[in-house]
Amino acid sequence: MSPIATGSTDNRTTAHPAPPARDASPATRTGAQVMCEALIRENASVMFGIPGGCIMPFYHAMWEYREKLRHVLCRHEQGAGHAAEGYARATGQVGVCIGTSGPGATNLVTPIADAWMDGTPLVAITGQVPSALLGTDAFQETDITGITVPITKHNFLVSDPTELPRVFREAFHIARSGRPGPVLIDITKDAQLARFVPDWDAPMDLPGYRPTTPRDEVDQRAIRAAAQLLQSARRPVILAGNGVIQAGATRELRAFAEQTGIPVITTLHGLGAMPHDHPLALGMPGMHGWVHVNRAIQACDVLLNIGSRFDDRVTGKASTFAPNARIIHIDIDVAEIGKLVRTDVGIVADARLALRALAVAVAVGSVAPRQGWLHEILAMRDEHQPRQGYTRRERTAPLMPHDVFDAMNDAFRGRSDWRVVSDVGQHQMWAAQLLDWSRPRTHITSGGAGTMGFSLPAAMGAAIADPEKTVWVVVGDGGFQMTSCELATIAQEGLTNVKVAVINNGYLGMVRQWQQLFEGKRYSGTPLTGPDFAKLAEAHGLRGIRVEDAADTHAAIAAAWAHDGCVVIDFRVEREANVFPMVPAGRAIGDMMMAAPAAASVVPSSPTKV
Amino acid sequence: MAQHTLIALLQDRAGVLHRTVTLLRRRGFNIASLAVGRSEVPGISRMTLVVDATDASQVVMQLDRLVEVIGVTDVTNERAVQRETALAKIVSSPKRLAELVDIVAGHGARVLDLTEEELIVQITDTPERVEEFITLIRPEGLAELMRTGRLAMMRGRTPAKLEAPAHYRAQADGAPHDEEAAA
């Protein structure tokens, strides 16, 4: 067999024979081998995928490279895509997922869209029918490059194998630079099979791609304008988003807040950018933000947005957002500035660089006194404490959702060897509100796309990326049933550091909450049954625990943590608990509901769960 | 709603028009006209795009995000020449057609074909005057109309962002052109 360029460790005998060398030149490779070597050159080490006809040559080749390229066989391509996302979100590295042509590729569409919305670096590799059959409606042919145009930063259809080294470099470069995001590479089967001498020196040809990088200089005029606004502000706030985490700027954020005394609000994806117990940390804003946070935004005179894209879940009705404030917006993507909220000073830059530049600029002048402002916000917080909607009470049955989060906080306290991956719905908002976030990349969730079923596979990816940390999945019974087949992947891979907390209320709870609050309790399509989740875990050879009493939450979490294997805890919680505060969609964020109105229901409540 | 005229420079790759049109559709911008073709440099295309938008800055920024879009400029308020070509087929009586030959010539249109039954004319002018011309001939038995969409070019030196990248230009100046990029 021909030697492999990536080192002697790959050059070994295996049970699977290498493809016969039809070319005497030692530099000759198949397209599939070039794909593997390109991945290794891009420092990819784990891939999540499922094989199929048109991607088989790649799977044939990856066997030779298996010591450097770990393949994790998932149960559904959606799981593979989310696992790659979880890997990326835990590490900041590009996640890699694989599917075959046709349904394999279309099943990747949801995670690609999810990565697009949340700026997650992802490279999706799909097999495609042989180039001679392209466009003929061949078996398992789908125009996946056409389908993914609006949800990728870029995509490639490769039928000329000699393009592979350049295309892989370009794909990884695009996925990880600027505002990160997904890139899809669709490769015809004949290109994977072709033999040729790869040109690893082929330069990238991306004249139209000029991402803002951490090496670009920050516009000093904008920085000075921002510094002046901040210095003269009496009631400033910082809004910190995903961009702070992506840029690795949490230290700079904290230092800047302390230097200026400006309180920090963290978006859903910004959670962990400031320690929750820092005196200047206020918490999450928006639709389920705390009262004092939303009121601080509505009352502030300068708002410094760092790396948040003013999602409607943050702003409420955008025209009413921060009505008294001058807005400074730091974003790595120029197209985000002024897209949704009028902006006084836009700074297109990497968040870390911009914060450093701002810190220098602000240090030059004097800062207006603003102690009263922080006290005003804290007074609002104290007024609505504790828990602003979740009353502290004796821990007795029935089990309330927030009992679970209290117990998780108790278990997490003093430890730094954990992450949480949440799904989408009520439990996601409770987790965001109630857990004590202190470190970046410890809170992973599907924010922009709101993809139910995200959490279990994403946790799998995070668990593989960082085996030292226990990954807690917080998921509803609805979302869990969308991708629970990945429990089999977890069992097959022997992942001991995934623990699942199912917040099981027998409803698609967030939709039910809206139906309760806004649709007269017409619980249409929301009551939901499911299997016994503890038994489901056991059926996979994993451990299952059921908790029905608040008194048992701590013991269950401790037992799960101590168990040397994946555990699923089925928390049977109060069925109709709600997430508060809540800003109804399309309203100003100061317009908050603190509890369900006593209003009558027009439709009686649905049958109870069987 | 105002109209904005944009000039874009693109890599001439399969799918680039699809990406451009998909983006505009998705972001809700209405395309009033679109003209695209190869530029003076192999592998590079130029596009003139007219969109209905009160503020075109989002269109420009979103288009610029596309990897294969090298540069975009809104030339609506710039010193740019703008032209459009239209072909029109007029069906009328032989007598009237003979009269129309003189009338259209008076408006700067060229006669491309004249038979007993029909007249085909070409007009190339500013978008406003093409519009006026069409209004003029519409009652005369306008049977078919084909328009190119607007073409625009800035006067003076080409702005840097609308200039083909150096390595493409070098390739164009050099010996046999590598057709790869134009595939």
Image (cartoon, grey):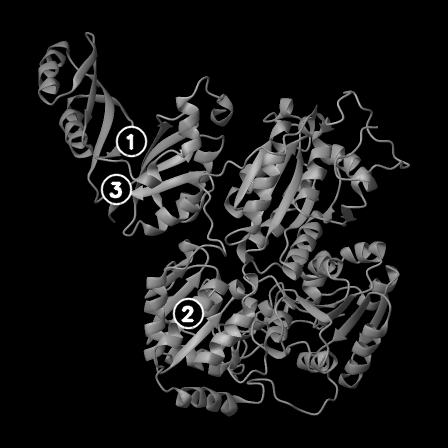
- What chain does mark 2 sit on? A
Label 1, secondary structure: give it.
loop
Q: Amino acid at mark 3?
A: Val
Separation of marks 2 and 3 at Cα, in angstroms = 35 Å
Q: Position of residue A303 (x, y in %)?
A: 39, 73
Q: In this rendering, would B84 be left or right of B43?
A: left
Q: Residue at x 61, y 58 (%)?
A: A451
Residues marked 2 and 3 touching at CB (< 8 Å)? no
Q: Position of residue A107 (x, y in %)?
A: 66, 46
Q: Nearer the viewer, residue B61 or A77?
A: B61
Separation of marks 1 and 2 at Cα, in angstroms = 47 Å
Residues marked 1 and 3 touching at CB (< 8 Å)? no
In this figure, which residue is indicated by the disc labeled 2? A358
Q: Nearer the viewer, mark 1 or mark 2?
A: 2
Relative vertical location of residue A267 with respect to residue A446 in this rendering, above or below: below
In this figure, which residue is indicated by the disc labeled 1? B149
Tell me the crowding category of disc 3: few under 14, some 14 to 19, or many 20 or more residues within 10 angstroms, Cα based: some
| Res. A143 in view | no
Q: Nearer the viewer, mark 2 or mark 3?
A: 2
Q: Amino acid at mark 2?
A: Leu
In this figure, which residue is indicated by the disc labeled 3? B75
Q: Nearer the viewer, residue A311 or A582?
A: A311
Q: Residue at x 36, y 87 (%)?
A: A369
Q: In this rendering, would A405 be left or right of A322?
A: right
Q: Residue at x 23, y 21 (%)?
A: B88
Q: Nearer the viewer, mark 1 or mark 3?
A: 3
Separation of marks 1 and 3 at Cα, in angstroms = 16 Å
- What chain does mark 1 sit on? B
Q: Quadrant of residue A42?
A: top right
